[in-house]
Amino acid sequence: MDIKAFLKKFRSFTVQDFNHLTYAMIKPDAVLAKEEILQDIERRGFKILFQQEYQLSQELAQDFYSEHAGKGFYDRLVAQMTAGPVVVLILEKDGEIPCFQVWRGTLGATDPGKATEGTMRHFYSYKLFGGPEAYKAEKATNCFHGADSVASVIRESNLVLYDIAMNS
């Protein structure tokens, strides 16, 4: 679905709809495995409503991660997120648990070394980088982003989707 058609649909979502939706990203370091990752996401029961490879500008990355401004990892995070394209995803999964929580559980801990075996961050840290040591050595990202609340799903989706629309 192209961005303009998706935005028309997106505008019709209610706050309740966002319990079944989440904003996700495949980070630049993992985009090379995009097709496998997308299949993995679907195997795990998520429906991909929207996907687009997109190059984040420095300004967008700074706005996106603004809650981390001033933290020691902020500049490195912005640099990594702008080093290449990301894959922007809007995912859907029905259930009693909000979709963002299910997605974050699927991802595992931010630090791949602390992520449970079978989670996406654990699996792809080994598949793409040889293990979580690359993350600790700051030579890799944790491969994925997942919104941490319904409010973040709405904020992050709006920020990125409208940027894509404005630059398409």
Image (cartoon, rainbow, N blue to C red):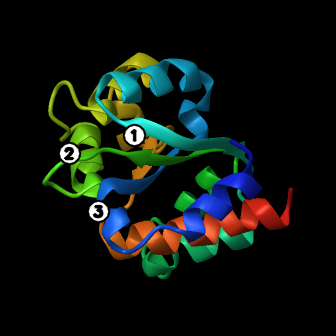
SS class, disc 3: helix
Place of residue 32 in the rendered image (x, y in percent of width and height, measured from the top left): 62, 24
Q: Is residue 81 above or below residue 29?
A: below
Quarter of the figure with residue 117: top left
Q: Which residue is mark 3?
A: 19
Q: Which residue is mark 1?
A: 135
Mark sitting on residue 104 = none
Mark sitting on residue 105 = 2
- Which amino acid, by three-letter code, is at mark 3? Asn
Number of marks drawn: 3
Place of residue 77 in the rendered image (x, y in percent of width and height, measured from the top left): 53, 59
Position of 129 compared to 57: left or right? Answer: left
- Which amino acid, by three-letter code, is at mark 1? Tyr
| Nearer the camera: disc 2 or disc 3 | 3
Badge 3, how many Cα within 10 Å: few under 14, some, many 20+? many
Place of residue 107 in the rendered image (x, y in percent of width and height, measured from the top left): 29, 41
Give the camera-side residue of 68 and 134.
68
Position of 164 compared to 106: left or right? Answer: right
Q: Is residue 156 above or below residue 143?
A: below
Could you tell which of marks 2 and 3 lies nearer the N-terminus? 3
- Whether label 2 touches label 3, CB < 8 Å: no
Q: Is residue 84 above or below residue 152?
A: above
Q: Residue at x 31, y 55 (%)?
A: 20
Position of 166 compared to 114: left or right? Answer: right
Give the camera-side residue of 9 and 49.
9
How far apart are labels 2 and 3 at the CA level? 15 Å
Q: Residue at x 68, y 41 (%)?
A: 1
Place of residue 73 in the rendered image (x, y in percent of width and height, measured from the top left): 45, 65
| Nearer the camera: disc 1 or disc 2 | 2
Quarter of the figure with residue 61: bottom right
